[in-house]
Amino acid sequence: MPEIVVPAESRSESGKNESRRLRSRGLIPGVLYGKGKETVPLAVSPKEITAILHSASGENTLFDLDIAGGRRKVILKEFQREPVRGQLLHADFYEVALDETIEVSVHVELLGTPIGVKLQGGIVDFITREIEIECLPTDIPDKISVDISHLELNKHLRVSDLTLPSDKITMLTEPDIVIAHVVVPRAEVVETPATEEAEVPAEGAEPEVAKKGKAEGEATEGKAAEKGEKGEKKDERKKDEKKERK
């Protein structure tokens, strides 16, 4: 792999105004630090850093920062992006010693289609996508690949099942951590609201409002009939009284 050299310049000022001035020149602010090293504020081209992030080894790429002609061996430790456009805003670099181990995160790559997907109708749930390892800077792998074609439905792949590419690498992530497993797809359940069920009357039943109206109608007819009978009796009494007077 060809040696990567990124030009950088030291800076003495900080703050939002300085960041704006740097971005107007096509640069972004950054910081260089290391074990027992003095922190150095600097500025770099975001294009150079973006190219490193898009390489096979990504943020674990080992490269040189060239500061005023002096080279420092570093890896990209942290970076910040603008949330909408994704443009780089800031970068932190960690200076390494080639003869001292460091701790880094490495991506996990799943290979193959599991039996549980092909024959048993399951889907892959990829849970842990990065693991922590310790090794020399020159031994950092681009990624950890693992074949999951043997994985059956409801079976797990754990960190302990991974094979490291070199015996010079030490696994730091707990062995019982699940990397991936094959699970049954969740079925979509459509529930009917309880209010809708309550509003639907039983078959053959008459709506309650209609019953109420009918009852009131029957009561009214009963009262009218009662008044009619009383009126007829009153008229008969008046006729009897007239006959007696004559």
Image: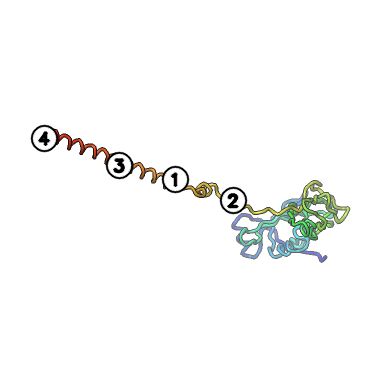
What residue appears at the point 29 percent right and 39 percent down from the top-left corner?
Answer: 226
Front residue of this view, candidates 111 and 172: 111
Q: Please give the label number shown on residue 162.
A: none
Identify which amino acid the numbered label 3 is placed on. Ala
Q: Name the side, left or right, on which 195 lies relative to 102.
A: left
Q: Please give the label number shown on residue 225.
A: 3
Q: Name the side, left or right, on which 192 lies relative to 135.
A: left
Identify which amino acid the numbered label 1 is placed on. Glu
Mark in the foreground, 2 or 4: 4
Q: Position of residue 237 (x, y in %)?
A: 20, 35
Work out how far the residue at label 4 is from the one at label 3, CA to CA, in angstroms: 33 Å
Q: Position of residue 33 (x, y in %)?
A: 74, 52
Q: Is residue 31 above or below residue 235?
A: below
Marks 4 and 3 close (CB-CB < 8 Å): no
**Furthest residue in direction bottom, as rendered:** 2
Q: Quadrant of residue 18?
A: bottom right
Work out how far the residue at label 2 is from the one at label 4, CA to CA, in angstroms: 85 Å
In terms of secondary structure, where does tag 2 sit? Answer: loop
**Furthest residue in direction left, as rendered:** 246
Q: Name the residue that disc number 4 marks.
A: 246
> Does the rendering let one see residue 74?
no
Q: Name the residue that disc number 1 marks.
A: 208
Nearest to N terminus: mark 2 or mark 1: 2
Mark in the foreground, 3 or 2: 3
